[in-house]
Image (cartoon, grey):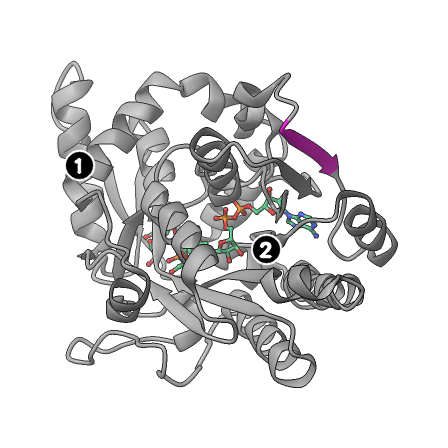
């Protein structure tokens, strides 16, 4: 079986659902169930004996050791993290704890488990670390996209902690020979994304008749990838990636934030028209994110060349699917956005008006 951390979050749950549908190999899914983790997303797996869910914190060394000893996975796919940049600006401590200390704890548990494996299993074992393009910092308009050799220059507490975790993963290969793989992906979107992130937040606010809060001048650029394509790339890297290597994942879809929000408004105008006017009228410019990175862009040619991956979705097909999913699953959004999340909305947006 494989072990997945963070499999109740956005990308982890998409990965687990795709994996079980595509391969049938069992998954041990470990998640702390923070505000971002949601068991409702895994409801389709109810009763599936190939999915074992355990609520646990990756910072808990005893729990990690026990789970590895009991389930003996052939690979660890490490998705669990605190992932929202704005939250890292408001409260960085949880990011240091989970992203740095948690990854360190998991690496230590993995190393202790891995050295006990018989030779063939030891050689085949993989620790795949899911990371981000944000570790490379910010590009100006004319810079080439990030490649695997771009120097690290993280700018937010989130990206600094992800960079720290990437360095630890690298060191465990270099020093101990642990067979690690690291992927650095650009912005994901798709089903089950928590509505604090740009695309689901804008869809939810548009439908609720609320302002669509665009930070700064709206000209920051992100490189968007449909979550199913990210999951497919991770499967390819797990199968054919070379231990110790890093792989950038991206869909060659650079977009300005304002263009993304305007396109979402147009899709909603077409599929769920308002009684009067366009959703574009709800677009509101608000105070910028402190230290806001201007542009991210990924050069994914190494991945295409070495493991034969290419995205299946264009931005247009992926976004249309995503809007449809959020329109059809409003109860999922209502459920995850209740309670504690409202306090976050108040904390993040009240000060921007
Ligand atoms: P998410 O915030 O939606 O989910 C994170 C999951 O990790 C949640 O289920 C949460 O409960 C769990 N978790 C948090 N702390 C934990 C802990 N201490 N122990 C166990 N579980 C814990 O995040 P996501 O968007 O799905 O991102 C998954 C991974 O992909 C992260 O490592 C992130 O850095 C990386 N990534 C995300 C994007 C993106 O656009 N969302 C892009 C590139 C890379
Ligand atoms: O690049 C990969 C990263 O993408 C991942 O590592 C992170 O986990 C993920 O959260 C994402 O980070 P971003 O900061 O780019 O995503 P977010 O959805 O928060 O914001 C996308 C852009 O939209 C960014 O330029 C800020 C802007 N924005 C965001 C929000 C929430 C707004 O203009 N208004 C908003 O309300």
Q: Residues within 10 Å of mark 2 (few under 14, many from 20)?
A: many
Where residue 115 sits, quadrant-wise, is: bottom right
Disc 1 + disc 2, Cβ < 8 Å:
no
Look at the numbered disc 1 and say if its residue's Cβ is closer than 8 Å to ligand 1: no
Mark 1 secondary-structure assignment:
helix
Look at the numbered disc 2 and say if its residue's Cβ is closer than 8 Å to ligand 1: yes
How many labels sit on residues?
A: 2
- Relative to 324, is 151 above or below? below
Label ID, residue 351: none
Give the residue pinned by disc 2. 78
- Relative to 322, is 308 above or below? below
- Of residues 60 and 264, the one drawn nearer to the viewer in this rendering: 60
Give the residue pinned by disc 1. 317
Instruction: Please say whether residue 143 is one of the residues in the magenta stretch.
Output: no
Side of 221 where 148 appears, left or right: right
Q: Is residue 312 visible?
A: yes
In which quadrant of the rendered image does the N terminus lie? top right
- Of residues 4 and 131, the one drawn nearer to the viewer in this rendering: 4
Q: Residue at x 44, y 82 (%)?
A: 152
- Relative to 157, is 40 above or below? above
Q: Position of residue 131 (x, y in %)?
A: 48, 63
Q: Residues within 10 Å of mark 1 (few under 14, many from 20)?
A: few
- Of residues 24 and 38, the one drawn nearer to the viewer in this rendering: 24
Where residue 132 sits, quadrant-wise, is: bottom left
Name the residue furthest right: 62
Stretch in magenta: 50-54
- Relative to 24, is 104 above or below? below
Q: Residue at x 45, y 29 (%)?
A: 21
Side of 353 where 263 appears, left or right: left
Q: Residue at x 35, y 38 (%)?
A: 190
Q: Position of residue 168 (x, y in %)?
A: 63, 76
């Amino acid at each position: 079986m494989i072990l997945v951390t963070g499999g109740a979050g956005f990308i982890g749950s998409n990965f687990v659902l795709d994996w079980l549908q595509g391969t049938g190999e069992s998954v041990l899914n470990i998640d702390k169930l923070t505000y971002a983790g949601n068991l409702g997303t895994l409801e389709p797996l109810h009763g599936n004996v190939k999915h074992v869910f355990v609520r646990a914190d990756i910072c808990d060394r005893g729990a990690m050791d026990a789970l590895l000893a009991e389930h003996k996975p052939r690979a660890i796919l490490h998705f669990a993290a605190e992932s929202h940049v704005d939250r890292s600006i408001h409260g960085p401590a949880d990011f240091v704890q989970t992203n740095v200390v948690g990854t360190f704890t998991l690496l230590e548990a993995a190393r202790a488990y891995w050295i006990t494996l018989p030779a063939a299993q030891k050689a085949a074992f993989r620790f795949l670390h899911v990371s981000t393009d944000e570790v490379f910092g910010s590009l100006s308009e004319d810079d080439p996209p990030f490649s695997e050799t771009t120097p690290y220059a993280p700018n937010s507490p989130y990206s600094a902690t992800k960079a720290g975790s990437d360095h630890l993963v690298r060191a465990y290969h270099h020093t101990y020979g642990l067979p690690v793989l690291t992927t650095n992906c650009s912005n994901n979107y798709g089903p089950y994304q928590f509505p604090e992130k740009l695309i689901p937040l804008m869809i939810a606010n548009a439908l609720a008749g609320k302002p669509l809060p665009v930070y700064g001048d709206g000209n920051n650029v992100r490189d968007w990838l449909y979550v199913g394509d990210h999951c497919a790339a991770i499967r390819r890297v797990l199968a054919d990636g070379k231990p110790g290597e890093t792989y950038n994942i991206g869909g060659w879809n650079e977009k300005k934030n304002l263009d993304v929000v305007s396109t979402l408004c147009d899709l909603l105008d077409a599929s769920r028209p308002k009684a009067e006017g366009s959703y574009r009228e709800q677009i509101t410019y608000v105070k910028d994110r402190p230290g806001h990175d201007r542009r991210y862009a990924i050069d994914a040619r190494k991945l295409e060349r070495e493991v034969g991956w290419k995205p299946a979705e264009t931005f247009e097909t992926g976004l249309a699917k995503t809007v449809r999913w959020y329109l059809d699953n409003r109860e999922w959004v209502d459920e995850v956005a209740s309670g504690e999340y409202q306090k976050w909305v108040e904390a993040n947006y009240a000060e921007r008006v």
